[in-house]
Image: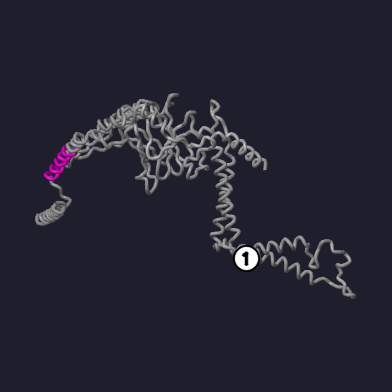
Amino acid sequence: MKLITLLVVIAGVIALAQLAKVGQLTSLIRNKREEDISAADTRLNGGLFVAFMVAFYASFIWLIIRYGDYNPPAASAHGETYDTLMNFNMYIIMAVFFLVNTVLFLFANKYRQEAGRKAKFFAHDNRLELIWTVIPSIVLAVIIIYGLRTWNEMTGEASEDALRVELYSKQFDWTARYPGADGEFGLANYNLITPTNPLGIVTADGVSGALEEIEGQIAALESELAHERGTLLAQIEEVEAELHASHDHGHGHSHDDHGHDDHADHGDHGHDDHGMSAERKAMLEARLHELEHMLEGPDVVVLSTAAAEAKADKIHRLKRHRQRIMEVKPFDYEGGVAAWEAGADDKIMKGEFHLPVGREVEFVFRSRDVIHSAYMPHFRAQMNTVPGVPTRFKMTPTITTDSMRTVLDDPDFDYVLLCNKVCGAAHFNMQMKVVVESEESYNAWLESQEEFLADKEVATESDARAEAINIENNESATL
């Protein structure tokens, strides 16, 4: 069927091309120039403009009737207000669309070329300037004021009893976090992000663990550079050169006529006969033995200059990372909740998160890497997530997942959180399931989720750890 349709289209194009050639030949036979246009031609073109306008409007109206509202049903308290604002803008756009195109097509027909008609020219008209300046300005002012009022209502301060949920974005997934019983999110710092702490939640145990991990990485890299074959050979050469230089210097001493060393009168003073202290010589020989042993060991590696420089640069960056972690200071939220302890009972979810119907929710958005956009179409909610700049949005779900499945007659329907900003190769796969349910079901689900620090003993030791890290920070700052 597709092949037949394609052949019909090709045949149509060929037929039109042949008709055009016939028209050109007819004009040549009648000695008619291409620039000569008859009154019949202009009437035909004018009529075709009007006919096209009618067909254009008919197809536009058919699309509206056939497909109706293209937005999914609103499932949030502000969704209807949002849709009203959207429809208001669409009504204005459609009114301008019909007005401008009607004038365009009708004028093309009415003012077609006719013999004896001359176009009127005027350089300026204050009334026209006033009309097409003032009227659009008023319309745009109404749109902007209406839009800003609606936006301020949707993004204003959340109520005190609102549920707070953090949505954390990174390439290419989402993580949801709920505050624990203390009602506060734990302090988060990107320097503490690890495979077991994807949000960088700050705890005394997490800080000490991150420092230990970095120290281990630095030690491993320094050991690798210390066992680099070229470095070892260069150090061996330096040590041997110092030993040989001292030996040669000893042979160059002068003697008197009786064959005695001219240094003999000065006593030994702890030096050997080569002019080097015994301690220095013993240290060099021990170092030479150590280097030769390292050179023969199994840990020797061969690195190019570029690879060695890259590892040295990584050591430098790890030391800077360690310093930033040591600069993270403990503090208390209002009400006396310690920021380093607040995160211990936070709850972190992957794959899906739940919301109670009818309760206001304040979302806090963060990003690890690039700008993402948290988009929940059924809730009419969208907000950019910006690295280093937390953003917020509030909304109240009004329809549970089960009820929306009934409304849409789709038993497989689920609310979804999407990324609406092209953020990389796997952007299309960046989504998270959202479940809206009753307050009772939500509370039961939240209660079943594990806390960030399940080990209570570690959590109860956080005061001592925080104090120890504070002392270490103060000593570092003093140094």
Tag 1 secondary structure:
helix
Query: Percent position (x, y) of residue 24?
Result: 13, 55
From the viewer's perspective, is residue 75 above or below residue 315? above
Which quadrant holds residue 308? bottom right
Please give the residue where the numbered disc 1 appears in the rendered image.
233
Query: Percent position (x, y) of residue 127?
Result: 30, 29
Left or right of residue 142: residue 302 = right
Region in magenta = 39-56
From the viewer's perspective, is residue 399 above or below residue 225? above
Judge whether residue 151 can be spotted in this image.
Answer: no
Query: Percent position (x, y) of residue 280?
Result: 75, 61
Which quadrant holds residue 441? top left
- The residue most toward the right is 258
Left or right of residue 434: residue 7 = left
Query: Percent position (x, y) of residue 250?
Result: 79, 69
Magenta portion: prevailing SS class:
helix
Magenta stretch containing residue 51, yes or no? Answer: yes
Q: How many marks?
A: 1
Q: How is the image coloured?
A: one colour
Residue type at numbered disc 1: Leu
**Residue at x-position 65% and y-position 40%:** 477
Judge whether residue 161 can be spotted in this image.
Answer: yes
Magenta stretch containing residue 340, yes or no? Answer: no
From the viewer's perspective, is residue 437 above or below residue 370? above
**Between 319 and 409, the one nearer to me in the picture:** 409
**Residue at x-position 52% and y-position 42%:** 192
Left or right of residue 249: residue 265 = right
**Between 121 and 67, the one nearer to me in the picture:** 67
**Between 383 and 302, the one nearer to me in the picture:** 302
Quadrant of the image containing the C terminus: top right
